Image (spheres, helix red, strand yellow):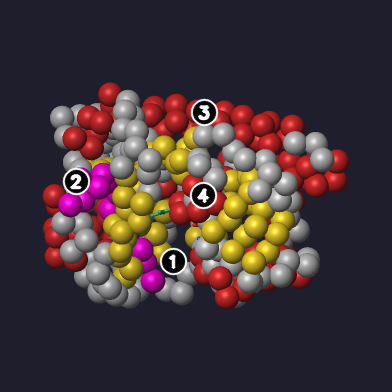
Amino acid sequence: MPPIIERFLDHLGVWEPFLRDGHCPSFRTASAWGGPELISNEFILDVHNTGWRLDRIRFDSMLAAEAKNRGVTPLPSKVRTARYDGEKWSVDCGEAGMHTARCVVDATGRTTLLARLAGMKPINHDRLVASAVFFEDSANPEAPGADAVLIESFRDGWWYTAATPGGHRVAALLTDTDIARRVRANRLDAWMGCLAETEHVRTIIGGSRPLAPPKLWPAGSRFLQGSAQPGLIAVGDAVSGFDPLSSQGIIKALRSSIFASYALADWLLRSDDSGFARYHALMQREFASYSVTLRDYYRQEQRWSDSPFWHRRHIGFEFRKS
Ligand SMILES: Cc1cc2nc3c(=O)[nH]c(=O)nc-3n(C[C@H](O)[C@H](O)[C@H](O)COP(=O)(O)OP(=O)(O)OC[C@H]3O[C@@H](n4cnc5c(N)ncnc54)[C@H](O)[C@@H]3O)c2cc1C
C-alpha cells in the first residue's frame, strides 16, 4: 500500500492497531517499464514517506476486530439473496437467518452480489488476470530491487514481486485471460518458463522454491453500471475494480466506504437520499480519471506494441462484457 494509506487509517482511528501488527515498511518501488533498466521511485518525497507490504489476513482481521469493538455484529454465514420490497430490504443470510434493513452495503468485492441481485452489472474494461506464486523465502536479497515492490514489463504483460511479511516472497504474472490460457499460466512449469523471459524478477527469485502452483485472480478494470435501487450502495471492488498496477485497490475501498457512510447517514438520519446519486457520480469521476492515468502509463511501454497484450492497451480499452 502506498504511503497515503496512513491518512485513511488515521481517519478511521485504526492507525495505532495497524502499526502494532508487524507489516513490513517499504521505502520505494522499482520498475523496469518502457526500457530494460530498473528505475527507483523513493517515497522520501511523499508527505507520509513509508509504504507498506501487508500481511493481508492480519490486516483484514484487524479491521474486522475494530468494527466489532464499535458495535458491528458479524454473522457466521454468507449472504445468499437480498430483495427490496419498495420500503425495506430482506436479506437471506442462510443459517444466520433472515434480516431486514432500510439500507444494504455491497462490500462483496468482485462478486458484487447485492448489486447484481438488484439488476446492476459490472462492465469489464479489459481481461487482466494475475497468476501468483508464493516462494519459500524472500529469495535473493542482494539482487537489485529485491528490497522494493518491483514491476517489470515483458512481451505478454508484466510482473511484480515483493518480499512478504513472514519471510516469503510473492511473484505474479499479469496478462489477459486468453494469453494466460495460451501460455498456460496456471501451470508451474509454464509459469516458470514465462518468468525466465524477465530480467529483474528472475534474478530476484533465483533458486527459491515455489510453495504451490500458480493461483489465478481476476485483476481487470471494471465499473458497476445500472440504476441502483433505493438504500443500496456498493463500495470497494463491488463498485469499481482497478488494475493492480495502480496499487490503489485497498485505498480505494476505504475511501469509497468513507464516502458511502456519509450518504448512508443522510438517508438513515434525515431520509435524504440525494447522497446516493452524489456518491455514484463521485465514483464515476474517480474511475474516469483512473482510466486516463492507466492508459497513459501503459502507453509508456512501446517495446512490444505488436503483441496482443500491449496492442490492446495502446489502441484503448475496447473490451466491454459483464
Ligand atoms: C493480484 C492482485 C494484486 C493486488 N495488489 C494490490 C496492491 O498491491 N495494493 C492494493 O491496494 N490493492 C491490490 N489489489 C486489489 C485489492 O486486493 C482489492 O482492491 C481490495 O481487496 C478490495 O477490497 P474489498 O473489500 O472491496 O473486496 P475484497 O477484499 O474482495 O473483500 C470482499 C469480501 O466480501 C466477502 N463476500 C463475498 N461474497 C459474500 C457474501 N455473499 N456474503 C458475505 N460476504 C461475502 C468476501 O469473502 C470478502 O471477504 C490487488 C488485487 C489483485 C487481484
Q: Earlier in the sequence, mark 1 or mark 4?
A: 4
- Disc 3 and disc 2: Cα gap in Å? 27 Å
Query: For the view shown, which residue lies furthest in the front direction?
Result: 85
Circle on res. 164: 1
Callout 1 crowding tier (Cα within 10 Å): few <14, some 14–19, many ≥20: many
Q: Is mark 3 within 8 Å of ligand 1?
A: no
Q: Residue furthest top?
A: 315
| Nearer to me, 22 or 43 | 22
**Residue depicted at 58% across the width and 56% down the height:** 82
Q: Categorize mark 3 by other alpha carbons within 10 Å: few (<14), some (14-19), many (20+).
A: few
The part of the chain drawn in magenta is 168-181
Across and down, in percent, residue 133 comes to 30, 65
Is the C-beta separation of discs 1 and 2 under 8 Å? no
Residue 201 — which label?
Answer: none
The amino acid type found where label 3 is placed reads Ser
Query: Helix, strand or loop at disc 4?
Result: helix
Queried whether the magenta region covers residue 169, the answer comes back as yes
Q: Is mark 3 on a helix, strand or loop?
A: helix
User: Label 2 amino acid?
Assistant: Ile
Q: How far apart are marks 1 and 2 (CA)?
A: 27 Å
Kindly report which numbered mark, 1 or 4, lies closer to the viewer in this rendering: 4
Q: Closer to the observer: label 1 or label 3?
A: 3
Q: What separation in Å lies between label 4 and label 3 (alpha carbons)?
A: 28 Å
* Residue behind mark 3: 289
